[in-house]
Amino acid sequence: MMDRRSWLRTALATLGLGSTAVASAAPASDLAADLEPLRRNYTLPALAAAVVKTGVIVAAGVVGVRALGRQDRAQIGDRFHLGSNTKAMTATLAGTLVEEGKLSWNTTIGEALGGPTQGVNPALATVTLEQLLSHSSGVPTDTPEILDIYFNSDALKQNIADTRLAAFANWKDRPPASKPGAEFHYANLGYLIAGIMIEKAAGISWEELIVSRIFSPLGLASAGLGPQASIGRLDAAVGHDTDSEKPAPMWWGPAADVPPMLGPAGSAHMSVLDYAIWAGWNAGAGKRGPALVKPETLAYIHSAKIGTGRLPHPRPGTPAEGEYALGWGLAKFDWTATPVLTHNGSNGFNLAKILVDTRSDLAVVALTNFPEAKADDGAAEAIEGLYKRFA
């Protein structure tokens, strides 16, 4: 299973500053010629990207191999891991339940999961769903103690939803690290707790909800949860472990992803074309079908809730500070006219980036089956170049 240091490092780096949403036909422009120089320059196994404008995928491409040391070429339909970019989907699921009156953005942990009588710390019990989804709950960024909760051998003996309940039971007596609503702390555990609140309100698991309320309505045929390759098959762009001297493909099975309990925080995978469909639906502000949530609900999900603080040493072109909505970052780049929605995702073996400009109804996504700095740099260069070209 993933080394705890890898997961901690990943968790600290996941924030990036009609009847169907998007046509799924082959895009008009193949981006292979744009992507291959970036893939080579940053020595990535595979790199995929897509651009969707006014509800149509106008360009897409994929280059490279599914796994280092193999000759299998990556294909446009290959699944890539989204990591923490799953969080925006979890926030949208919450929005569906808010519209149904089963939750509100101000529903507290105590109201949903029990207050002091159930052993929940009184201060933690006051934390709201919105604060969990905006990383303003005071629940801390992953610590060694939290990692011990995630990487628990008992989790192999339970259904996934039950492992989330057990994780919460192991944390619920602790107070928030800061006053709820006051500070930004990127917290995967917060999304796990939000996932439990969603499950309690809906009466079914988060896994069933994301399939029935997001994957299926949008027609995301490649979408799934967990490691992206089928066991025994090299049928996806698999992630790579870079902790050893030589990067190693992580083929499949439990070691190829984060613990399943963290699904609401980041376990989705899909092809670059399907991810572009999701991106395009958001870029259209929910005004194109399918009606996952009302446009006003999506606008609320997309709106800033808290400042993320100032980065001490941002790289050129990267915002020094931004804001966080619900599952989305908001930032103004040097090369965007206005703030845009953005997010990074990684499970420690892959990296995903998304940029959504609702004012221009334009979105760009980039995916690679490699983690860490050079993957982030390569995908960021792809996003910037394609945004400038198509905006």
Image (tube, rainbow, N blue to C red):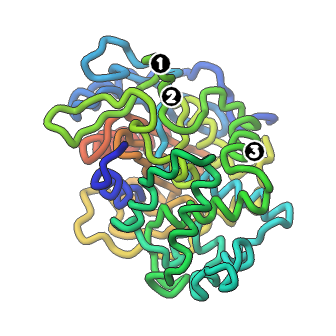
Residue at which label 3 appears: 213
Categorize mark 1 by other alpha carbons within 10 Å: few (<14), some (14-19), many (20+). Answer: some
Question: Measuring 59% from the left and 74% from the top, which residue is drawn there?
Answer: 131
Question: Tag 3: residue type?
Answer: Arg
Where in the figure is residue 380, as x and y percent of width and height?
Answer: 35, 45
Picture quadrant where residue 255 is located:
top left
Residue 335 visible? The answer is yes
The answer to whether residue 31 is left or right of residue 297 is left
Label 3: which secondary element: helix
Residue at which label 2 appears: 79
Where in the figure is residue 118, as x and y percent of width and height?
Answer: 67, 79
Label 1 and label 3: CA atoms lie apart by 26 Å
Residue at which label 1 appears: 235
Image marks 1 and 3: residues in contact by CB distance under 8 Å = no
Q: Which of marks 1 and 3 is nearer the N terminus?
A: 3
Question: Measuring 63% from the left and 54% from the top, which residue is drawn there?
Answer: 162
Q: Compared to 165, does 344 lie above or below?
A: above
Q: Single out the mark in the foreground, 2 or 1.
A: 1
Q: Compared to 342, does 54 lie above or below?
A: above
Q: Which of 274 and 66 is in front in this view?
A: 66
Question: Tag 1: residue type?
Answer: Asp
Where in the figure is residue 220, as x and y percent of width and height?
Answer: 66, 32
Q: Which of marks 3 and 2 is nearer the N terminus?
A: 2
Question: Tag 2: residue type?
Answer: Arg
Label 3 and label 2: CA atoms lie apart by 20 Å
